[in-house]
Image (cartoon, rainbow, N blue to C red):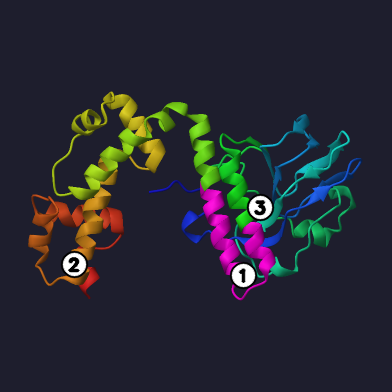
Amino acid sequence: MKPESNGMDLDRLSPYIRVALDHYLSPGWVIRERALLDYELLYVMEGRLNVSLADGEHVGKPGDLFLFKPGQHHTLTVVGSEPVRQPHVHFDLHFRPDSPSVNVSFKPLAEMTAEERSLIREDVCSGPPFDLPTRFPLRNPTVFEHMLLDLIREYRLGLPFGQTAAKGAFLRLWVYLLREHTWSRNSRLHANWERLMRVKQYIDHKPEQDMSLAALADIADLSPSYFLRAFSQAFGLSPIKYHQTVRIRKARDMIRFTSLPLTEIAEQVGFRSIHAFSRAFKRIDGISPSQHRT
């Protein structure tokens, strides 16, 4: 259901929250050029912050978010006479054995030791499946603010299992950002979201029925070609492949939790023969249906 890259398996996403602060920078404050070992989400909540990147100067205003990536040089300078409120989070997207011992970097690459450079995390956010920019204007900053401040509060409370709770808060925030970015790149996808969900729910509730691309596009009231592109972008699978996946998921549950013969299960989930069912099951699940009962 989701695209993957060599560097990012979303099923194994387990972030480590290194620092989470709701912090103010005083007028005149400068963080000189540095490269991080990890990622940082920095949100401009109040004031104005000049951010110098390889592609030029950017002035962050309230509602702007920056995602600084491992090894990326940047400089921060407070603009004007007002302090900058900048809640921020340093994190690894994947927990590593050395995650608790890695510090936040304030050095450029040229001043790092070889050992420090070896700690720089792989940047998996600049390519698929994320393709996230460094500067990230938000359509609804208030929603993001609440999520970010909740994450920071959870991290700062120091309660038992706080890191686990912070991970959960971070994952909710991260998914929100991914959806924001997906919809910002395709406003029509966002505009048609309810239509796409209507089709997805139809497939979820009636997987045993035969379905064609044209019939599903009619349910969405979209042209077949646009519906195919939009559904695939929204859910990571074509409508027909998603239909097959839902069928096999239902069949898998029936194999595990009932004693029905495989031929009857195949018929109940819409396959005309046990051979077609077995081929589809192995293609999607990687093993034969009978192996789920051994």
Q: Which residue is mark 2?
A: 255
Residue nearest the viewer, comparing 206 with 60:
60
Q: Which mark is first along the chain, 2 or 1?
A: 1
Residue type at numbered disc 1: Gly
Q: Is residue 115 left or right of residue 70?
A: right
Q: Which residue is mark 1?
A: 162
How many residues crowd around disc 2 within 10 Å: few (fewer than 14), some, or many (20 or more)? some
Q: Is residue 20 left or right of residue 131?
A: right
Q: Which residue is mark 3?
A: 122
Relative to residue 80, is residue 29 depicted above or below?
A: below
Assess whether mark 2 and mark 1 are in contact (beta carbons under 8 angstroms).
no
Circle 2 — which element?
Answer: helix
Relative to residue 78, is residue 291 depicted above or below?
A: below
Residue type at numbered disc 3: Glu
The C terminus sits in image quarter: bottom left
276 in the magenta segment? no
* Residue 157, percent from left and from top: 67, 68
* Residue 76, percent from left and from top: 83, 41
How many residues crowd around disc 1 within 10 Å: few (fewer than 14), some, or many (20 or more)? some
